[in-house]
Image (cartoon, rainbow, N blue to C red):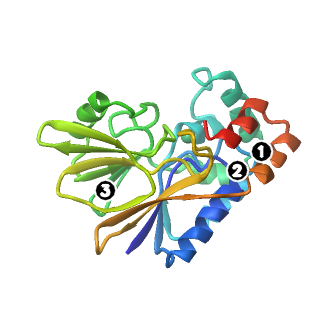
Amino acid sequence: MRLAILADIHSNLAAFESVLKDLESRGGFDKIWCLGDMVGYGPQPNECVARLRQFDHVCIAGNHDWAAIEKMDTFEFNPVAAIAAQWTAQELTADSRDYLTALPLILNVDGFTLAHGSPREPIWEYLLSQSAAKENFTYFETSYCLVGHSHVPLVFELDGTQVMLRELGETEFVLSSNRMIINPGSVGQPRDGDPRASYALYDSETKKIGHYRVEYDIAATQKKMTEFDLPRPLIQRLTYGR
Ligand code: ZN
């Protein structure tokens, strides 16, 4: 089975479509594992939810999904994220809202735990340090865990008692027997200095994971955001991938 691992799409349909096209060019996929934050920040929340639902998939909730359905307050968001969350909440159709409301926080699938932020704190925790990752290895039982939230493609590998951290460049590797926490980066709002959409593809037969970057029509997404009067810093950051 070929699993497309997509995180933090953030209502960016142009980025999502480019990733789907790239997947097609690599031989396609059977199922999507979506790591949350389908919505928030970007201009096309309903379109992104609807597009995801056209595929066989599983999906978990992220903090922006919860903010958009008012399952949590936005006071812990920065001001521009809060404005976008309020805009998204108004924009959502009843259908999208129902879909997001039903999302679980954690899933176990085929030897992987899926959690948006971390297995310890699925909604809030940013996994960026080895010390935080080390603690989190005790919070899930599968060999591997997939997270999003930081929008930075990273791999934490537990080797004995040591946690090794490496940035996940455009690469393919076979899963070892060491436990790992893997972040495929963000489809719709990359923050590692590379503005291209970021995602991973896993083949459960060969145990190979590929991490890929895809150019998309950033200007098209920015134009829509401008039309909807979404905050300028959110529009500009797409240019830089920061
Ligand atoms: Zn996010």
Few, some or many C-alpha atoms within 10 Å of disc 2 (few <14, some 14-19, many ≥20)? Answer: many
Q: Earlier in the sequence, mark 2 or mark 1?
A: 2
Q: Nearer the viewer, mark 2 or mark 1?
A: 2
Q: Residue at (30%, 64%) from the top-left corner? A: 110
**What residue is at 38 percent from the left and 34 percent from the top?**
127
102, 155: nearer the viewer:
155
Q: Which residue is mark 1?
A: 91
SS label for mark 3: strand
Instruction: Answer left or right for 219 relative to 4.
Output: right
The disc labelled 2 sits on which kind of residue? Pro
Any mark on residue 45, and which? 2
Quick one: SS at disc 2?
helix
The residue pinned by badge 3 equals 112
Residue most toward the right? 227
Answer left or right for 85 relative to 136.
right
Q: Residue 130 occupies which quadrant of the picture?
A: top left
Percent position of residue 139, x then y: 25, 38
> Does label 2 point to a residue whose CB lies under 8 Å from ligand 1?
no
> Gap between marks 3 and 2, in whole Å?
27 Å
Q: Are marks 2 and 1 in contact (CB under 8 Å)?
A: yes
